[in-house]
Amino acid sequence: MNDPALEKVPVVDLKGRVLTPCSIAKAEQNLQNGLARLVDGVLHLNYLPLAYRKVYRMVRRRDGYVCAWCHGPGSTLEHVLPISWGGRTTMDNCVIACRACNHSRNNALPSQFLAWTGFKPTHPVILRILHDEPAALRRAKKSLRNRPIQSCASKEEAQIWVSFHQGDFDASRPQPPEQPISRFRPDSRPFLQFFVP
């Protein structure tokens, strides 16, 4: 007797590249959310998940392993203008961040996060977006309205696209954490003494 939890559905991206098969439940969820279509038993994603990896590699090459917010060691891809506000996974909107800064930011706009933490950013991507944050938000919303779902580089980006086009778009407006999480310490410990997950 076959266990449905063990059965897998073949998956391909927009360019027909074969991806790791997913469970039936995950395939159904993608179909319900409008993120894929089923053709001859194969789940065809409506976004390009491998594009996310490519951007991550290019941003990591550009920024190294340095958090753009606290200047400590970083390893995650951070969207300066968050995906939930219409930000995209592009070189012009992404920086490297430590897990602590990335998670404590919680979809806050760059200006909000800097007000909470007191960080002084020097990264050109952050500075460019901060220079005219309202205009960046307008461009992001216009982009959501005009670009196809096929331009999305992650499942999260595609979910925001779908919610926007279904009229359910509501950018997350987080409250500041009681104490923002960060590994930033104003001491002179050598780089290798920082904890890197």
Image (spheres, rainbow, N blue to C red):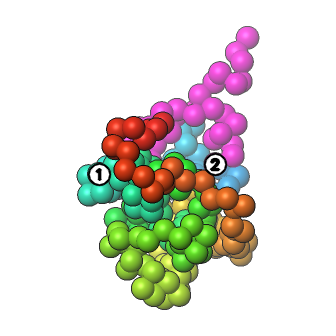
Give the residue type at disc 1. Answer: Gly
Image x and y of residue 185, in percent:
48, 53
Location of mark 1 (residue):
64
User: Does 80 sit left or right of 124 as displayed?
Assistant: right
Q: Assess whether residue 91 is covered by the magenta stretch.
A: no
Can residue 173 be seen? yes
Q: Residue at x 50, y 84 (%)?
A: 133
Labelled pair 1, 2 in contact (Cβ < 8 Å): no
**Tag in front: 1 or 2:** 1
Q: Is residue 129 left or right of residue 175?
A: left
Residue at image point 37% right, 50% down: 188
Relative side of 184 to 108, left or right: left
Residue receiving disc 2: 30
- Give SS at disc 2: helix
**Three-letter residue code for mark 2:** Asn
The quadrant the N terminus occupies is: top right
Point out residue 103 in the picture as x, y percentages from the top left corner. Answer: 59, 53
